[in-house]
Structures are given as structure tokens and as C-alpha cells.
Amino acid sequence: MSHTKLPWALRPAWNDDTEFEIYPLERKFDFGEPAEIAVVRIYDESEANAEFIVKAVNAHDELVAALVEMERFYVELITSGDCGFWNPDDDQHVIMMRAALAKAGVL
């Protein structure tokens, strides 16, 4: 099963000034209102946390694609011999990129 289509957005909850709703821009209830994905309720940090969630979710696919391409390019450069010769599996940058991609569920 995949997640709700991006992009997601944020709005204050209609009934509580300490709650914020995260909702998809392209999905609506039958009566026209956007269908919420989640409600964030952490009082002082509610809006900041909800904004952070929406920003991270909306940027995720592009950031992962960029990192996949960067890892591919960097490993290709390492193995080409143009910059010397070393094992990409031992390179700290490759290790960090691969760990981040694994955390994102790509590797």
C-alpha cells in the first residue's frame, strides 16, 4: 500500500486553536472539504511540528532521488580511476549516503 498522494498541506483545525490538520491537496470528502491525513496536537509546538511534517513529506521524493543520483555518480567517479583508486564500500561519504537511503527505505 502506498501513502496518500502528495503534496500535502496544513490548516488550523476548525474546533481547536492548538490542533493542526495535515491534508492532501487533491483528495476531498464528498462535500468538498479536504480529507485530513492527521491531526497534530502538541500545544505550543503544534503548528511548527505540523509544518515540519508537511515540509519533510513534500520534499522526500525529490531528496531521495537526488541522493540516489549523487551516490551513483560518486561511486562511478570513485571506480573510474580519474581521482585515484579506492573501494567505494569503505568510503565514508558512500557509507553515509547508503545509510540515509536505507533509512528512507530505498536500499
Image (cartoon, rainbow, N blue to C red):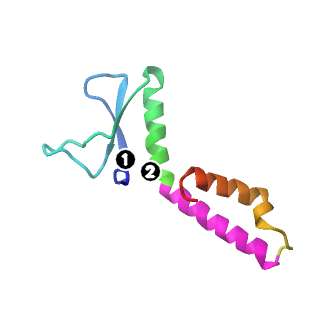
**Image location of residue 8, percent across then percent down:** 37, 47
**Most prominent secondary structure in the magenta stretch?**
helix
Identify the image quadrant of residue 91: bottom right
Identify the image quadrant of residue 9: top left
| Mark closest to the chain's N terminus, 2 or 1 | 1
Residue type (three-letter) at the residue carrying disc 2:
Asn
Q: Is residue 29 magenta?
A: no
**Image location of residue 33, percent across then percent down:** 20, 41
Quadrant of the rendering where the N terminus is positioned = bottom left
Would residue 69 be found to the left or right of residue 49 on screen? Answer: right
Q: Secondary structure at mark 1?
A: strand
Q: Secondary structure at mark 2?
A: helix
Q: Which residue is mark 2?
A: 58
* Residue displayed at 25% across by 28% down: 14
Q: State yes or no: discs 2 and 1 in contact (Cβ < 8 Å).
A: yes
Would residue 9 be found to the left or right of residue 30 on screen? Answer: right
Q: Which residue is mark 1?
A: 8
Q: As rendered, which of 13 and 77 lies closer to the eye?
A: 77
Q: As rendered, which of 38 and 32 lies closer to the eye?
A: 38
**Image location of residue 47, percent across then percent down:** 43, 30
* Residue displayed at 65% across by 65% down: 70
Q: Please give the range of residues in magenta.
A: 61-82
The span from disc 2 to disc 1 (Cα, nearest Å) is: 7 Å
* Residue displayed at 66% across by 57% down: 98
